[in-house]
Amino acid sequence: MLDFWENQLKFYFTNEEQVLLPLMKRTQPSTHRFLTDHAYIQNLVSRITDKDIDINKGAADLTHRIDDHIRFEERELFPMLEQQLTAHQLSEIGAILNHEVACPYYKPEFWKN
């Protein structure tokens, strides 16, 4: 879990924040949720790593939180941005966010190769 956080998810969150936040309206509830989710997940990883909580409960909560965050992005955040941004902006965002650090233990979309 820590390896996945350090080598994949942390980078993705940082990249998302650097790319998307400047394009989001600070007063929108979705912006608050976006940042709150990222902070909660980062804090939860720290708490599990520091053994502040039971690893089984923490891992279950982490799984649930990441899944909820992905669904939020897919169902609310990204459709909202698609309405607000130009096709060119969306294409640039896609290119930046798709350029991720490879995780040595997981190959996304393995079925496409």
Image (cartoon, rainbow, N blue to C red):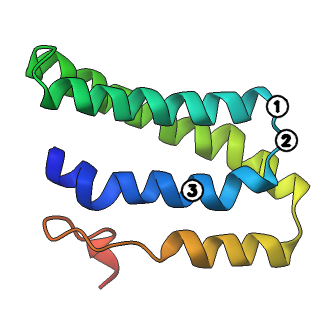
Q: Are marks 3 and 2 in contact (CB under 8 Å)?
A: no
Type of amino acid at the residue the image marks with label 1? Gln
Q: What residue lies at 26% left-to-right and 33% top-to-bottom?
A: 45
**Mark 3 neighbour class, 10 Å CA radius: few under 14, some 14 to 19, many 20 or more:** some
Q: Nearer the viewer, residue 40 or 95?
A: 40
Secondary structure beneath dot 1 equals loop
Q: Earlier in the sequence, mark 3 or mark 2?
A: 3
Relative to 48, say whether 79 is above or below.
below
User: Would you say 73 lies left or right of 55 here?
Assistant: right
User: Would you say 29 lies left or right of 8 here?
Assistant: right
User: Residue 74: x percent and y percent?
Assistant: 60, 46
Q: Which residue is mark 2?
A: 25
Per the model, the C-alpha gap separating discs 3 and 1 is 17 Å
User: Residue 60: x percent and y percent?
Assistant: 22, 23
Secondary structure beneath dot 3 equals helix
Relative to 78, say whether 111 is above or below.
below
**Mark 2 neighbour class, 10 Å CA radius: few under 14, some 14 to 19, many 20 or more:** few
User: Residue 29: x percent and y percent?
Assistant: 76, 26
Type of amino acid at the residue the image marks with label 2? Lys
Q: What residue lies at 37% left-to-right and 52% top-to-bottom?
A: 10
Per the model, the C-alpha gap separating discs 3 and 2 is 15 Å
Q: Which residue is mark 1?
A: 28
User: Would you say 40 lies left or right of 76 here?
Assistant: left
Type of amino acid at the residue the image marks with label 3? Glu
User: Residue 65: x percent and y percent?
Assistant: 39, 28
Relative to 72, say whether 15 is above or below.
below
Q: What residue lies at 15% left-to-right and 15% top-to-bottom?
A: 52
Q: Are marks 1 and 2 in contact (CB under 8 Å)?
A: yes
Q: Quadrant of residue 32?
A: top right
Q: Earlier in the sequence, mark 3 or mark 1?
A: 3
Q: Which mark is residue 16?
A: 3
Q: Are marks 3 and 1 in contact (CB under 8 Å)?
A: no
